[in-house]
Image (spheres, grey):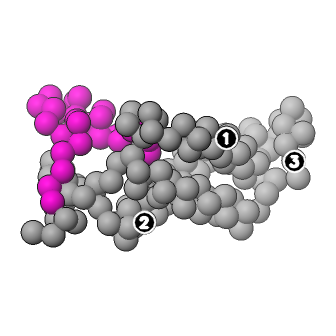
Amino acid sequence: MSEMNTPILPPFAQERRLLHRLVYEVWDHLWPWSRHGFERQRFIVALSLGLGAVVSVAWLLAAAGRIGANATIGWWVGWSVFEVLVRRQSKPYVKEGPWWGTQYRRADMADTICYVTFKNLLIGIVLFLAMRYFGALDFLQGLPELKWLYI
């Protein structure tokens, strides 16, 4: 058995209560850092927080229609590259088998890139659809308080 096929268990994988396991799983997908990663790489954590703030501002600008799709995609791709590097250090595993299963294995670089890319694509779609559905896009475009953010 190669090292990449070695089973690995994230801390939440043995949780028996379904609701708790689902909450942990969602958290695992949305938060790329681990406690171990925080302890080992404080510079990366500080850089992550700064980059996260910049990406959030880019999302606000995109939602307000003040930057184009290319810039939004560029920010999102930049965040994804950074997240791949963080996940390789903090959470080097992927799910093996069906999405509802509880088997995990060590991820190689291609696994991590595919995982982060697909996950972030889905998050971006859900964010923009939710903002459109709830009227946030129209609301943000009309806020004079956000004029300082406009490019």
Residue 26 position, x and y percent, is 35, 40
What residue is at 55 percent from the left and 56 percent from the top? 82
| Quarter of the view holding residue 108 | bottom left
Q: Secondary structure at mark 3?
A: loop
Residue drawn at 19 percent across, 65 percent down: 3
Q: Which amino acid type is shown beneath numbered disc 2?
A: Ile
**Tag 1: amino acid:** Gly
Nearest-to-viewer mark from 3 and 1: 1
For the point 18% across and 40% down, which residue is it? 13
Question: Relative to residue 45, is residue 150 drawn left or right?
Answer: right
Which element carries disc 2, helix, strand or loop?
helix
Among numbered discs 1 and 2, the one appearing first in the sequence: 1
Position of residue 100 measured from the top left corner of the image (x, y, whole percent): 18, 50
Q: Is residue 93 visible?
A: yes
| Relative image position of residue 77 (x, y in whole percent) | 59, 63
Residue indicated by mark 2: 113
Q: For this rendering, which residue is in front, 124 or 107?
A: 107
- Asked whether disc 1 touches disc 2, contact meaning CB atoms under 8 Å apart, the reply is no
Is residue 1 one of those drawn in magenta? Answer: no
Of pointers 3 and 1, the one earlier in the residue sequence = 1
Q: Is residue 70 above or below residue 47?
A: below
Q: Residue 31: say if magenta.
A: yes
Are circles 2 and 3 on residues that touch, CB within 8 Å? no
Q: Which residue is mark 3?
A: 150
In the image, taking residue 86 as reference, residue 25 lies left or right, namely left
Alpha carbons under labels 1 and 2: distance apart: 22 Å
Q: Which residue is mark 1?
A: 50
Span highlighted in magenta in the image: 6-34
Residue 94 placement: quadrant: bottom left
